[in-house]
Image: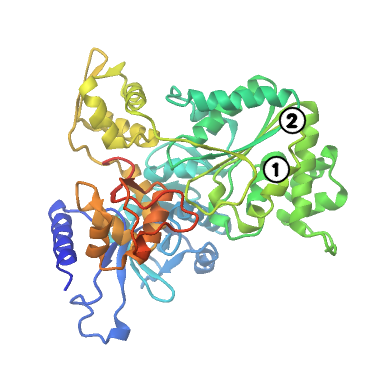
């Protein structure tokens, strides 16, 4: 018996029961529970409570099930067809894409049945890890959705306010009671990017200055390509927004695209997002208007065949296959021609965000795209999360680090309407947030509206010792946790149960796995910014202690969860 692990699980179970709420992230349920003890081993089904996105709809659409499955959701069986239909998204894939998939499914249902009334809510479900995963929403999640559904009028899609920031990246929202209403789909627009600039830019002036110098070089005919790496919420999109504003103020043309994370498995989905922006497609055009906008690529040097290839991305007739000329190369050449033609008139800022969500077909062609733009007045900027599978690009790489304690305090003070933060609160505030700007803003919003904050004469002099974790932050962390393998999630739960950094050998012992097995998991989580390390294991003769080929640093001796105490 692994006594260390038994004690730890007992402690975790006690903490979870005492808090009165489910622990954050997937909670493994033991196979030999009271429900499955009588089953043979082959019939014991592992299950876990995991964050999901739920869709509820009052709809007469007979093809509800087909629509949900086409968007990758799970149809929750209902006994009475007069009851609202239910579906779950994110139960067997990345939670970040689940919101977009659920909203897209809701809009498709509304298009098929104009009198339908769908709502999309966040919550939790018990997920049974069978060959085809099955999800059963928790009662609290179902009740939250049904309560909102009672107040929704037909012919509209409403979304959970906690999901609104993610939905807002892709759709126009009207913020009226009870929940925001989805009015139309869109690509990241000037309005959306401008909203990112609503507060001061803190702690990023040096990074912005380097890209501003690139804009100046671009005017002299020297192009540049760069990759900006940073954890979620660290401010990559904010820098893109600032750079876009600076570029347009100097007369440059900007093309900022966001790939469809929910369509990462579709060939050239990222190029679809780019051409949507380049051709000014907003998703509301009829076939004739869309064709006319795509035909405008001829003015930017595209041939009729290349225009047809782009049109095929949006449902048009594809050109005949040409031997030795793959479709992807034709699309990239078309994009290069368009950006080069625009750069002949004015410098161009081309930004493609969230590179980790780019489909494999586009990923293989990005270096070809960059190589063809080096002699043009184009500043190419990619953003991505560290530790993810990224294409090999010949570009400048810049890592966006978390804010230091002073910058964190300045941002927090601005968000709560103060001038400064008392010096003795600098360290606790930085430990709470980990210097992540998004976490700072969510904490400020939560404290400003719910107490736990003392402000007098523009000075923040009091801060709650254990503030409530904002729901949006819970959802953000949960989406990252669910994307990890099950064994990696177990490592995180173990580290979360202790207050101080844990020795790596002890962590492996508690988990009951060999160090050689735990090592790759820890390395990946360190690269992604999920964990942080302290010290280094001395190199010995054990295989697990020898440096892995290609590893720049030895494995840390002690580990802790990164990102702040929240």
Q: Position of residue 94 (x, y in %)?
A: 45, 57
Q: Is 426 on the left or on the right of 163, as rendered?
A: left
Q: Position of residue 557 (x, y in %)?
A: 29, 51
Residue at the far right in the pictured view: 304
Q: Position of residue 535 (x, y in %)?
A: 30, 45
Q: CA distance from mark 1 to mark 2?
A: 12 Å
Q: Is 303 on the left or on the right of 92, as rendered?
A: right
In depth, the one of 245 and 69 nearer the eye is: 245
Residue 82: in sight, yes or no? yes
User: Callout 1: helix, strand or loop?
Assistant: helix
Q: Is 139 on the left or on the right of 63, as rendered?
A: left
Q: In percent of the image, x 59 and y 35: which residue is there?
A: 189
Circle 2 sits on which residue?
A: 377
Q: Quadrant of the N terminus?
A: bottom left
* Residue 370's disc number: 1
User: Callout 2: helix, strand or loop?
Assistant: loop
Q: In percent of the image, x 27 and y 36: which residue is there?
A: 432
């Amino acid at each position: 018996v692994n006594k260390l692990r038994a004690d730890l699980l007992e402690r975790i179970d006690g903490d979870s029961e005492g808090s009165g709420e489910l622990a954050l992230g997937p909670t493994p349920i033991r196979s030999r529970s009271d429900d499955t003890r009588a089953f043979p081993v082959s019939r014991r089904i592992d299950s876990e409570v995991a964050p999901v996105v739920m869709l509820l709809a009052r709809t007469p659409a007979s093809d509800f099930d087909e629509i949900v499955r086409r968007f990758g959701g799970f149809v929750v069986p209902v006994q009475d067809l007069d009851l609202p239909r239910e579906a779950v998204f994110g139960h067997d894939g990345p939670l970040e894409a689940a919101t977009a998939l659920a909203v897209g499914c809701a809009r498709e249902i509304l298009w098929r049945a104009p009198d339908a009334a769908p709502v999309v809510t966040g919550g939790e479900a018990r997920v049974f890890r069978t060959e085809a995963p099955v999800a059963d929403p928790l009662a609290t999640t179902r009740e939250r959705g049904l309560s909102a559904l009672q107040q929704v009028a037909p012919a509209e899609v409403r979304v959970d306010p906690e999901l609104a920031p993610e939905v807002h990246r892709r759709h126009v929202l009207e913020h009226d009671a009870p929940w925001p209403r989805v009015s139309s789909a869109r690509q990241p627009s000037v309005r959306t990017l401008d909203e990112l600039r609503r507060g001061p830019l803190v702690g990023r002036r040096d990074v912005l200055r380097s890209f501003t110098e690139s804009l100046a070089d671009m005017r002299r005919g020297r192009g540049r390509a760069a990759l900006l790496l940073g954890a979620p919420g660290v401010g990559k999109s904010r820098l893109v927004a600032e750079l876009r504003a600076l570029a347009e103020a100097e007369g440059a043309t900007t093309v900022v695209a966001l790939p469809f994370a929910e369509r990462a498995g579709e060939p050239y989905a990222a190029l679809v997002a780019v051409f949507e922006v380049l051709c000014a497609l907003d998703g509301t055009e009829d076939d004739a208007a869309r064709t006319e906008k795509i035909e405008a690529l001829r003015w930017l040097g595209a041939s009729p065949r290349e225009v047809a290839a782009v049109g095929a991305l949006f449902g048009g007739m594809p050109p005949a296959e040409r031997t030795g000329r793959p479709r992807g190369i034709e699309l990239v050449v078309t994009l290069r021609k368009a950006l080069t033609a625009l750069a002949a008139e004015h410098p161009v800022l081309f930004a493609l965000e969230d590179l980790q969500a780019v489909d494999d077909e586009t990923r293989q062609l990005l270096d070809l795209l960059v190589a063809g733009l080096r002699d043009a007045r184009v500043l190419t900027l990619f953003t991505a999360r560290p530790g993810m599978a990224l294409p090999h690009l010949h570009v400048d790489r810049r890592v966006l680090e978390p804010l230091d304690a002073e910058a964190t305090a300045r941002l927090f003070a601005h968000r709560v309407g103060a001038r400064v933060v008392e010096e003795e609160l600098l360290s606790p505030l930085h430990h709470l947030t980990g210097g992540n700007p998004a976490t700072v803003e969510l904490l400020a919003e939560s404290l400003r509206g719910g107490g736990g904050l003392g402000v007098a004469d523009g000075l923040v002099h009091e801060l709650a010792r254990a503030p409530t974790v904002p729901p949006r932050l819970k959802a953000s962390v949960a989406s990252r946790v669910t994307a990890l393998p099950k064994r990696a999630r177990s490592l995180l739960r173990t580290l979360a149960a202790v207050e101080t950094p844990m020795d790596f050998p002890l962590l492996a012992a508690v988990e009951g796995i060999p160090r050689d097995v735990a090592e790759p998991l820890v390395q990946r989580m360190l690269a992604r910014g999920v964990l942080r390390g302290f010290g280094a294991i001395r190199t010995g003769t054990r295989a697990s202690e020898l440096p892995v080929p290609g590893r720049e640093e030895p494995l840390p001796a002690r580990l802790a969860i990164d990102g702040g105490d929240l």
